[in-house]
Image: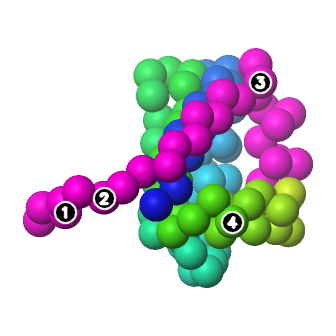
Amino acid sequence: MFIAHVTFTTSAADRFTAIATLRAEAATVRAMSGCIAFTPFADGTTGIGILHEWQSAEAFAAYTTSPTFAETGRTLRPLMTAPPVSKRFDATLIEAVD
């Protein structure tokens, strides 16, 4: 499994637009081949995060080169107050507990 944790900041005034953009994209991303989870979240008054889970790094790479990713970037990047931080992990699922 491939996991990416992306965080970025916006102004407090732009936070709603950023979250709304990510929520609008969520269904499309979740329908992409290899996507296990796409979870946008707010962190404090200006922080935004996205937790990605993908079946492979290749599936994530296909997402990052997709028109959906490009379109979202065109909306979000002007709202960011600093460059995004992306941490990427190669993970093994040990257990899923419901």
Q: In this view, does 21 lie above or below 32?
A: above
Question: From mark 3 to mark 2, how far is it between C-alphas?
Answer: 30 Å
Task: Answer with mark 4 or mark 1, whichever residue precedes in sequence.
Answer: 4
In the picture of the structure, the residue carrying the numbered disc 2 is 93
Q: Is residue 58 above or below residue 18?
A: below
Magenta run includes residue 85: yes
Residue plotted at (82% across, 37% down): 77
Question: From mark 4 to mark 1, how far is it between C-alphas?
Answer: 23 Å
| Residue 56 vs residue 17, the one in the foreground | 56
Q: Which mark is residue 39?
A: none
In the picture of the structure, the residue carrying the numbered disc 1 is 96
Q: In which quarter of the image is residue 76?
A: top right
In the picture of the structure, the residue carrying the numbered disc 3 is 83
- Give x and y (percent) for residue 40: 51, 49
Residue plotted at (66% across, 28% down): 85
Look at the image and tell me whether residue 25 can be seen.
no
Question: From mark 1 to mark 2, how far is it between C-alphas?
Answer: 7 Å
Binning the other alpha carbons within 10 Å of mark 2 as few (below 14), some (14 to 19) or many (20 upward) gives few
In the picture of the structure, the residue carrying the numbered disc 4 is 58
- Give x and y (percent) for residue 87: 58, 34
Residue plotted at (61% across, 80% down): 33
Q: In this view, does 21 lie above or below 46?
A: below
Element type where label 3 sits in the image: loop
